[in-house]
Amino acid sequence: MVRSIINPKKAKRKNKGKMNGDGASSSSAAAAPSMPTKVWQPGVDKLEEGEELQCDPSAYNSLHAFHIGWPCLSFDIVRDNLGISRKEFPHTTYMVAGTQAEKAAWNSIGIFKISNISGKRRELVPNGSGMEDGDSDSESESEDEGPAMWVLIFCSSHRQLRKVAHEGGVNRIRAMQQSPHICASWADTGHVQIWDFSSHFNSLAESESDLKQGATSVFNQAPLVRYNHRDEGYAIDWSPTVEGRLLSGDCKNNIHLWEPTSGTTWNVDTTPFVGHTASVEDLQWSPTERDIFVSCSVDCSIAIWDIRLGKKPAMSFKAHKADVNVVSWNRLATCMLASGSDDGAFSIHDLRLLQNAECATEVVNYKYHKYPITSIEWCPQDGSTLAVSSADNQLTIWDLSLERDEEEEAEFRAQTREQVNAPEDLPPQLLFVHQGQKDIKELHWHPHIPGMIISTAADGFNTLMPSNIQSTLPSGDD
């Protein structure tokens, strides 16, 4: 984010600059002499009268924003067959998302395709070519660059949308990994439903139009299965190892197991798994063990379950001092589990240390965020990287393999002439801070596009690829 002046006459002039680390710096609306960069620090600096934050696109390889009408509490990225490691722009992604409409009858599930997601591309243009500020942003300042410079170009993405009516607001929605057209939704009415969206995805895949297909009409479609939990909930997860196996947990601390009996039918075990003393907030199956799953709860605990051992947890331990809102099981380093709490802290647990309920599994605890953690997820391509969102309107990215190197930091400052002045307690593992969304609810890494994160908030979606997370650019003539 960068500062801009709403009323230059009432505000002091600020230094122009940019930052690639957290997308935040201070700048003036009026032209100013070249000055060393001054970083705007979230949670530390205050905006002066007449100032607001604006995005600095040079901090991203790609950044796009869109919305589907009503606010969305939960979404999922649908796995596709366009390639498992896509690095060339433009990108295409398929998603499902549920609404939180003003009236229950107005809710729907959106099935949509975002295409032409463009990003930073290297294009050589003459220096001083007459391009106005805002048309592009150079990779570096033009002071000593000679006759040419690189420019960054971001183009509009195309959105195609189809809507299916959904009774009540969607608390959470998840697509099955093995059959991505099969999705499960948690409604605030207390119902969990399974849907077959294959016809909608086929229609989107066959259409090359950038029209908002189905955006003005809502399809009435019956779910394949509908189960009443008799209370609302948020926790739901498909098994990555057993096709069709599903878990759902509610606010009455009950967890139910769904077993597929065919491609379109499921048997829901009405006898729940019970071990928590308060609402079950999140569930995740083990990435490798077909019968093991983890849960977290408002009772401040995390429980490990083995469905072969009955309806009680195999192990449970206190994980935080407040409600545990979210968990994420590392799919590349399966002994590592991340959890986020209502007090803004998030922790990394090493399950190899878990011998009994008294054992300490926490290997690190971060208290950078000051408001509840709303989402946490390990990067699918890098086992040491994870992303976290919080009610403080920040999405942060962390690399746990990093350690502070004071000599390297000093050399970097000298080379870039950057005035960082970061707080001494700022963790060196913090790679990036993304801002601009209000009330961020959920984030996901794209399983097929390295470095891409999609997040949903009260004011819509962001698709972002930070420049210091994924450095690969399209391989053109450069």
Image (cartoon, rainbow, N blue to C red):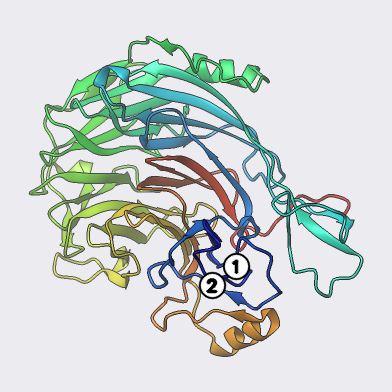
Q: Position of residue 425 (x, y in %)?
A: 38, 81
SS for dot 1: loop
Is residue 166 in sight in this rendering? yes
Residue annotated with mark 2: 39
Q: Amino acid at mark 2?
A: Val
Given contact means CB atoms under 8 Å apart, are the residues at marks 2 and 1 in contact? yes
Compared to residue 244, the image places residue 21 above or below, namely below
Q: Judging from the image, what secondary structure is the residue with disc 2 in?
A: loop
Mark 1 closeness class: few <14, some 14–19, many ≥20 residues within 10 Å: many
Q: Nearer the viewer, residue 314 or 457?
A: 457
Find residue 230 and report its image quarter. top left
Query: Hey, what amino acid is under mark 1?
Result: Met
Residue 263 in view here: no
Residue 118, above or below 123:
above
Relative image position of residue 339 (x, y in whole percent): 30, 58
Residue at 64% from the left image edge and 33% from the top image edge: 82
The picture quadrant where one finds residue 99 is: top left
Residue holding disc 1: 19
Q: Quadrant of residue 256?
A: top left
Q: CA distance from mark 2 to mark 1?
A: 7 Å
> Is 228 situated above or below 459?
above
* Camera-nearest residue between 240 and 55: 55
Q: How many marks?
A: 2
Quarter of the rendering occupied by the C terminus? bottom right
Q: Is residue 71 left or right of residue 296?
A: right
